[in-house]
Amino acid sequence: GQNIDQPTEMTATEGAIVQINCTYQTSGFNGLFWYQQHAGEAPTFLSYNVLDGLEEKGRFSSFLSRSKGYSYLLLKELQMKDSASYLCAVMDSNYQLIWGAGTKLIIKP
Amino acid sequence: ETGVTQTPRHLVMGMTNKKSLKCEQHLGHNAMYWYKQSAKKPLELMFVYSLEERVENNSVPSRFSPECPNSSHLFLHLHTLQPEDSALYLCASSQDPAGGVNTQYFGPGTRLTVL
């Protein structure tokens, strides 16, 4: 079957760095997405990786290793507004998104 | 603001009621999606419309009935729901998924409570 695993909850301190991991097993691979979802709001697109390596976008970076079925989202210089859920999703061979359950990130002052 | 709007934002209904959820996208996309989001569970894809034709129906109970009158609007008609249907219902849009990789853009969702 298809499966996406990510931690349920993480806690970090304002100003610090946090890495949210995602591992996947899917039928085919057409890229991996990260979304941010604040409570009661829409998931918003953060990043897309289809090739191995690190993609940097401001304070957020996303890494992919296709051979290991692994990705992480790295958040630097954490701010209180980064408190949210982070959703990992893989696009399979049918171009359908397979979703993880999300990681709730709590930022403490 | 993602360019996808949903109404109502909150809905409480009894098991015998009939109601409809509405989604509208202003992004010029030609594919629209309904997802169900329950606490601590992955998003569940319910329906996909591409170019106003339904292309995906993931074994969703018939008490959920989608309608896509044009590429900008999507409805989810609800009738005789069960308490376990209480969840956040998210609408999303994208370019035609048959065209390859596409990014989905989401609305804020309708929080549905079935009593």
Image (spheres, coloured by chain):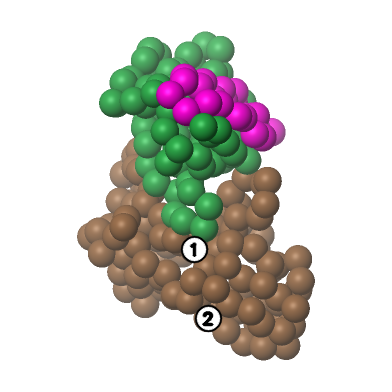
The mark nearer the N terminus, 2 or 1, is: 2
Q: Chain of mark 1?
A: B
Real-space CA distance between mark 2 and mark 1, rounded to the nearest whole angstrom? 13 Å
**Placement of A18 over or under B21, stated as above or below:** above
Give the dominant element type of the magenta stretch: helix, strand or loop: strand
What's under tag 1, amino acid-wise?
Gly
Which residue corresponds to the image point at 37% horizontal and 67% vertical from the top-left? B5
Image spot of residue A19 (x, y percent): 51, 21
The residue at the far left in this view is B28
Q: Which mark is residue B14?
A: none
Left or right of A10 on screen, residue B25: left
Can the viewer see residue A97? Answer: no
Image spot of residue B81 (x, y percent): 71, 77
Q: Chain of mark 2?
A: B
**Placement of B16 over or under A95, stated as above or below:** below
**Placement of A83 over or under A69, stated as above or below:** below
Display colour for chain A: green
Query: Residue B73's quadrant in the figure?
Result: bottom left
Query: Residue B18's quadrant in the figure?
Result: bottom right
**Is residue A4 within the magenta segment?**
yes
What's under tag 2, amino acid-wise?
Ser
Which residue corresponds to the image point at 37% horizontal and 51% vertical from the top-left? B105
The residue at the far front in this view is A109
Q: Which residues are magenta?
A: A1-24
Q: Which is closer to the viewer, label 2 or label 1?
A: 1
Pointer 1: what residue? B109
Image spot of residue B12 (x, y percent): 64, 79
Pointer 2: what residue? B20
Element under disc 2:
strand
Can the viewer see residue A56? Answer: yes
**Is residue A2 within the magenta segment?**
yes
Display colour for chain B: brown
